[in-house]
Image: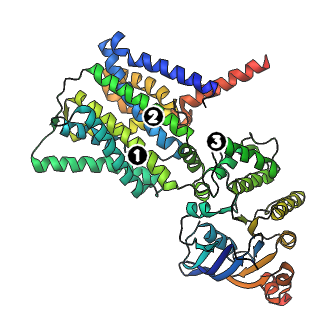
Amino acid sequence: MIAGKELQGVIVATILLLIAGALPYYGSDYLLSLGITIAMFTVLATSWALFSGPTHYISLATAAFFGLGTYTAGLGIETLPFWVLIGLAGVLGAGLAALVGLATLRLSGVYFVIFTLGLAELVRQVITWGQNMTGQKGLYVLTDFTEANLYQMLVALGAAVFLVGWLINRSRLGFALRIIGDDETVAAHSGINTALAKVLLFMVSGAVAAMTGAILAPRYVYIEPALAFTPLLSFQVVIMALLGGVHRLWGPIVGVIPFTIILETISANFPNQVTLFIGIVFLVIVYFIPRGFAGLIEQMRDWSRSREGLT
Amino acid sequence: MSEAVLSLRGVTKRFGGLIAVNTIDFQVRPGQVVGLIGPNGSGKSTTLNLISGALPLTEGEIHLRGSTISGLRADKIARRGISRTFQLVRLLPSMTVEQNIIAGAVFGHRRRWGAEARQEAARLVERVGLVGKGNMAVGQLTYIDTKRVELARALASDPTVLLLDEWLAGLNPTELQVGIDLIHSLRDEGRTIVLVEHVMDAIRSLCDYCVVMSSGAKIAEGTPSQVLSDPEVIRAYLGDDDA
């Protein structure tokens, strides 16, 4: 049963999705290029928040999954259809997430963060080593896809992520994750298999990041480990998700859009100050808006409601 | 006498060289309220943690209705029918009173979801005396009400055995009487309960049977009046001079 308020949310989301999906028909090339970046980070940050929002486990493994997907597309582009490669990247991403999850999700807090950061580096080094052994440098990913095609694939993936996230939030799995995030001991003593619940969500998040990487491979044309596994990507995803707010499904996107637009402007005009900007945003989140823009929006809504109540 | 619901055989827990629980045996029969008592540091709470699976056993076996539960993870033990409260109250801070209780109803021994789980939570809100507080945030509650929420959460899975770890500790005299009456009403319902407790009034009025521990070992067992007049129990509590 869908309540009236939820139905309203679904309708608004669908309309916004259609407007976003139609961008190639009315936007300029510049807007489309910006749209791809925004769509990419929306997908990555939203799927990241699906896992990290409720559990509070900060994963810095996004680059590992993303790079895995990029390389899956790069290695298979000559032999398999592209949509098969996207699916395959998802399966591999989920598999890697399962392995990492089983090994590390028993660890808590900071150990998990360090491990996930190391993972991206580990996968990158393995691929670099593989390339050195075979004498290959990088991979060419040559396709007929236009920017518009790739953009629409990302929007479709984004829609799927929102749908999956919405379903998870309504499910027992989502409820279990929220209990785990509040108190893992209580969760276990209430009958929740905490390790399994965390690994499942981490797999969803890993699969989506890998699929995003696969979709973007043709855009890069030439891929090499340093590009596909850049650790900066993992940090950007974390910061954008936190800026938007990870306690709501729609939170990350309200962080991604302003962050990406400002970041693009800064990197076009002051290319050396990009890292500084990311650092400042991080400080602002920690000190002033710990619940992100979504938290601010909700606060303002509550405030205006209580004012209406008074008059 | 009827078959034991819960039985501990040779249960031992060592932390390095320290023996916290030393070859403990006891049985709990259906509908019984068993008190686990003893001075501070005697291993009562550790024993409770071993039953609920919060800690793994070093040696020994625990059976619930004839099947072995020792060695299982806490979540599996909860599903088999043991639920508990904690010595220091543990609530889910981001959720309301009702959601805290539902958390106990969804994944445990008896599993409910959606309207059914909400109905059960509403029933328990009333049962433990939280009428009208179902939508409150847990941060707004008084101390005894947080204890009530935790109790309701533990009851929400309809457990075979309920473990209460000093549920009455920290209550003021008025609250204490309310608390004792509440546990008493559970006992009248026919719940099987194992409780760790320091409050003597509660032990006398609630327990059918007591197991007394001192320095990790069982030193006496029997009805409350039997064990509380046992010279060795008095020595354990008060020292040699008063025995």
The residue that mark 2 highlights is: A46
Whether residue A142 is situated above or below residue A87 in the rendered picture: above
Q: Find the distance from the CA under tag 1 to the CA under tag 2.
A: 14 Å
Neighbourhood count class around disc 2 (C-alpha, 10 Å): few under 14, some 14–19, many 20 upward: many
* Dot 2 amino acid type: Thr
* Dot 1 amino acid type: Met
Q: Find the distance from the CA under tag 2 to the CA under tag 3.
A: 26 Å
Q: Residue at x 53, y 37 (%)?
A: A286
Q: Are marks 1 and 2 in contact (CB under 8 Å)?
A: no
Report x, y in % for residue B206. Answer: 84, 69
Report which quarter residue B229 is drawn in.
bottom right
The residue that mark 1 highlights is: A203
* Dot 3 amino acid type: Gly
Neighbourhood count class around disc 1 (C-alpha, 10 Å): few under 14, some 14–19, many 20 upward: many
Q: Residue at x 84, y 78 (%)?
A: B224
Report x, y in % for residue A275. Answer: 37, 33
Q: Find the distance from the CA under tag 3 to the CA under tag 1.
A: 26 Å
Report which quarter residue B23 is drawn in.
bottom right
Label 2: chain letter: A
Whether residue A183 is situated above or below residue A48 in the rendered picture: below
Q: Is residue A160 visible?
A: yes
Label 3: chain letter: B
Report x, y in % for residue B60. Answer: 57, 80
Report which quarter residue B94 is drawn in.
top right
